[in-house]
Amino acid sequence: MMVEVSHQTPYTVDVLLDRLEELTAGMDRFAYVVDLTGVNRPDASTRERLRRRIAEITPRIAHVGVVVGANVVIRAVAKLAAFAIGFRSISFHMTVDDALEACRRALR
């Protein structure tokens, strides 16, 4: 599970995804939860860095469960960004538990 920092930058994207790659090294496929409940909309350079980094690991991602809570603005922005980034299997949830269950189902 990743809890995204409130103000994302290309650097924070690299730090978090470096750690994700470290944790999933040797796995053919994996799923993860990302909590966006406390984030602000990232700028264009950060979105581009995220798109590039995700593209590198997309073949191994079975599913991403995104926690957006009740914030409809974050939910809408996250949906647009997720499809622009290229996630193949993604779901949006109110709670971490719901997102975790979606990831577990995707790995069965």
Image (cartoon, rainbow, N blue to C red):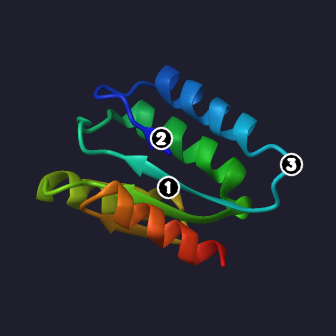
Residue 108 position, x and y percent, is 66, 79
- The quarter holding residue 43 reads top left
Q: Secondary structure at mark 1?
A: helix
Of marks 3 and 1, which one's residue comes earlier in the chain?
3
**Cα distance in 3D space between marks 2 and 3:** 19 Å
**Depth order, front residue of 10/15:** 15
Please tell me which residue is depicted at 28% across the width and 29% down the height of the picture: 6
Q: Amino acid at mark 3?
A: Gly
Q: Secondary structure at mark 2?
A: strand
- In the rendered image, which residue does mark 2 sit on? 2
Of marks 1 and 2, which one's residue comes earlier in the chain?
2
Q: Could you classify mark 1 by the number of other residues whose Cα lies within 10 Å: few (under 14), some (14-19), or many (20 or more)?
A: some
- In the rendered image, which residue does mark 1 sit on? 85
**Depth order, front residue of 59/49:** 59
Q: Is residue 29 visible?
A: yes
Please tell me which residue is depicted at 51% across the width and 61% down the height of the picture: 64
> Which residue reaches farthest top?
11
Residue 71 position, x and y percent, is 13, 53
